[in-house]
Image (cartoon, rainbow, N blue to C red):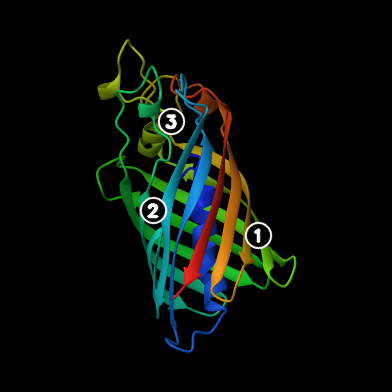
């Protein structure tokens, strides 16, 4: 959930959609998938002096697949290598903060806009099990940081129409990205509050790992309409919670949405 900071349940559910959509043939456009929809989220705000403990909002949903190209809310992916079970994807991905310091009483001067990352993801699928490793670097001059996302998942068909997926993983954020997510840069400080990873005494210089757990669900409502949902939690170490910006040692997100295939 570090990618969205208490909102990755949304992305995980949306990214998982193409697999379900592709499994159904489209006689009008073989090899192409187009899905549109909308969803709502509720995410906890882990920041100190949060104006609201829970943030609510909505986002459009979309999935487009054509050949090796995939575009959805998680960004743009190009399958550079398709070895069946093993795939390598080139990635351009937005970093969307569903909550940010602007929604606090003490740190509303901090600027955390949507960023854009680029990198690659290597994935392995073996039946119901999947593992992946993704490397991303900021190319939008927001955080200037890098991240590595390690994830594993297990899918099960609970019924003919309902598919569940449990996931677990950890995200490593380097010092620059950790400061953007959890800290306060020297050039942002007010009232002497500074917590810059790699710079402030006591703050780790090598970045931090953030473990996460999640559960996603997809229900085939009709032949072309699917309901999706997800819950996920992040768990923060003392390296993160020592920051004056952070109030909680965990955060959670819930997402529900509906999409239709065209």
How far, Cα to Cα, is label 2 from label 1? 24 Å
SS state under label 1 = strand
- Label number found at residue 182: 3
Total number of numbered labels?
Answer: 3
> Marks 1 and 3, how far apart in space?
29 Å
**Mark seen at residue 165:** 1
Residue placed under numbered mark 2 in the picture: 136
Give the answer, above or below, for where 18 lies relative to 148: below
In what element is the residue under mark 2? strand
Residue found 52% across the figure and 27% down from its top: 53
Badge 1 or badge 3: first in the primary sequence: 1
Residue positioned 33% across, 52% down in the render:
117
Q: Residues within 10 Å of mark 1 (few under 14, many from 20)?
A: many
Closer to us: mark 1 or mark 3?
1
Report the front residue among 148 and 46.
46
Sequence-wise first label, 2 or 1: 2
Pointer 2 local density, CA inside 10 Å: few below 14, some 14–19, many at least 20 = many
Q: Nearer the viewer, mark 2 or mark 3?
A: 3
């Amino acid at each position: 959930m570090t990618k969205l900071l208490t909102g990755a349940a949304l992305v995980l559910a949306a990214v998982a959609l193409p697999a379900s959509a592709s499994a159904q043939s489209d006689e009008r456009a073989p090899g192409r998938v187009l899905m549109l929809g909308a969803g709502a989220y509720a995410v906890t705000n882990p920041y100190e002096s949060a104006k609201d403990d829970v943030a609510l909002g909505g986002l459009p949903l979309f999935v487009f697949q054509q050949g090796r190209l995939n575009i959805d809310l998680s960004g743009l992916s190009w399958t550079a290598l398709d070895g069946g079970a093993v795939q390598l994807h080139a990635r351009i991905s937005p970093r969307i903060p569903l909550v940010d310091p602007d929604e606090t009483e003490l740190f509303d001067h901090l600027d955390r806009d949507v960023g854009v990352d680029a990198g690659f993801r290597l994935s392995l699928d073996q039946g119901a099990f999947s593992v992946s490793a993704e490397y991303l670097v900021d190319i939008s001059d927001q955080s200037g940081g890098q991240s590595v996302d390690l994830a594993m998942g297990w899918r099960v068909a609970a019924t003919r129409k309902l598919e569940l997926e449990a996931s677990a993983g950890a995200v490593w954020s380097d010092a620059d990205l950790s400061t953007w997510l959890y800290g306060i840069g020297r050039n942002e400080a007010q009232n002497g509050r500074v917590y810059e990873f790699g710079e402030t005494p006591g703050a780790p210089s090598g970045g931090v790992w953030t473990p996460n757990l999640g559960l996603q669900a997809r229900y085939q409502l009709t032949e072309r309409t699917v309901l999706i949902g997800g819950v996920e939690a992040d768990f923060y170490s003392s390296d993160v919670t020592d920051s004056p910006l952070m109030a909680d040692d965990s955060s959670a997100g819930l997402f529900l949405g509906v999409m239709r295939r065209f």
